[in-house]
Image (spheres, coloured by chain):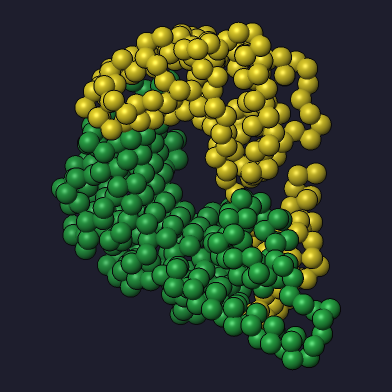
Chain colours: A yellow, B green
Amino acid sequence: MRVDLSRHKSLRTLEVPASCVNGAFRYESPDIASRLLKHVLLTITSPAFFEVVVIYRDYDFRGVESPHHPSCPPVRGTSQADRAKESIWHHTQFGVFREVHKVRGFRLVLCADVWNRVADYSVGVLEEAVAAEKADGGFDKRFLEPLVIYSPRLCHTDLNQDLYASSPPSPFPWPEGLPRNGNPWPACIVALFR
Amino acid sequence: MTESLVKRVRHQSLAAIRGIRSRVYRWKISATRPSSTTRLPFEIVEIIIAHLIYDTPSLLACSLTCSTWYIVVVLHLHRTLTVRTTQWSNKRFMWPYPLRHMHRLGLLPLVQNLQVRQGYLQGNRWFTPKRLDCRTLCHFFALTNVQELEIDHLCIHRFMPRIRRHFKNFLPTLRSLNLREPQGSRPEILYFIGLFQHLEDLKLRYWPHKHLLPMDGPTFTPLFAPPLRGGLTMTSVSGVDLLKEMIRLFGGIRFRYMDLFNVGGVWLWIDACAETLETLRLYPTSGRASL
């Protein structure tokens, strides 16, 4: 084991995928993530360091359908049991970062790095989790309420399909053989997620 | 280059608007007075559009409002071009048809992000010189403003030693390079990286289960030492030898962002950027990147 970030004098941000913390819980070693993060944070000597960003991907949200690329939010909503499990997981995760925060202060940021279709749903889930933790008294003057941000990703193949399927008033001639039905969502894409 | 392109387009659009106005006034048609939106300064329109760049349907709706808005929106709409090399849901989006369509529309100079991706079905996935026949190469060379290049399964060794000729239009503008499972020796991959003199971000990915080791081969000296001061993302790369050669050929590495997953010698990479590293993505409980 060799962890030493003492030479990194300009280090400002540490990013941690939520799946790694989740993985530690799954393998029945919930303290391993906090232990390792504490160890890393203790080695940081950078005066610029001030935030830990937890990265949430599509698969970190229960019910987000991803049989194909890109994923989409749960159409029929999530079950009570799933919601309960998710809230317990978020609560445990906040507990980990609360523990880590005792070693060294930082601002916690929750970043939803998801496809743009899931953006509203995922940000909503994270904000609900933060609100629930706040109601439980999980944050105080030292461990402040985390910031929820969204790092958007676009499926550019969809973008191309949008462009070809619709008809913007281009000054250039429209390509021959391409339909001008004006439907921004072609049937193949709609069928894909039905 | 983008600014000059935008300026040129702006001049053309303004000329068109002035022409419309003069015609309207000449014909004294009061009902066709230009709307107030056309009088909004470009900067304001750009700010409005900037809020919508991830919302394609809204962008498309904005492009329908007037030519001024279209001019602002078109840069965002055509910023990214994704082409699939294997079977996709529609053959129109497979290599090289999107290139041809965009070339026919004269939109290729607007593309800043070119993604050559593998589809989700089987097929010939390798990107070899065969894909760049004379006609396609002509369209490929029309991509004069590409800043981000993402290629899956690039057969670098098949392009050698004349790889520079095929990618010459990207040399002055490219800032970000993303290679997924490139095929080639370590010197060949480094030579390819060294072609781009302004390269800042580098992404190199292999599939975790394959964990390919770039083999050694004939030595190629990179033409440039790119600055590489942006982000480094690597997945499943046995990186110690690669790191040593990068330091030797490029005079060190100066990345500000690092995301290393399943990379051999991960702390050597992190230490190599000790002076410049600002953001580090850690995988505290995963495989070889574990602490």
The C terminus of chain B appears in which quarter of the rendering?
top left
Q: Residue at x 75, y 85 (%)?
A: B24
Residue B151 figure quarter: bottom left
Q: Residue furthest bottom?
A: B26
Q: Measured along the vertical axis of the image, is residue B121 above or below residue B78?
A: above
The reply to whether residue A184 is visible in this rendering is yes
**Left or right of residue B192: residue A25:** right
The N terminus of chain B appears in which quarter of the rendering?
bottom left
Residue A126, horizontal then vertical, whole percent: 63, 26
Q: Residue at x 71, y 14 (%)?
A: A84
Number of callouts: 0
Q: Measured along the vertical axis of the image, is residue A30 above or below residue B92?
A: above
Q: Residue at x 77, y 77 (%)?
A: B33
**Left or right of residue A163: residue A193:** right
- Residue placed most toward the observer, B208 or B3: B3
Residue A33, horizontal then vertical, whole percent: 44, 15
- Residue placed most toward the observer, B289 or B154: B289
Residue B47, horizontal then vertical, whole percent: 58, 55
Residue A178, horizontal then vertical, whole percent: 73, 72
Q: Residue furthest right?
A: B31
Q: Residue at x 37, y 57 (%)?
A: B175
- Residue placed most toward the observer, A117 or A79: A117
Q: Measured along the vertical axis of the image, is residue B190 above or below residue B260?
A: below
Q: Measured along the vertical axis of the image, is residue A52 above or below residue A105?
A: below
The reply to whether residue B220 is visible in this rendering is no
- Residue placed most toward the observer, A136 or A155: A136
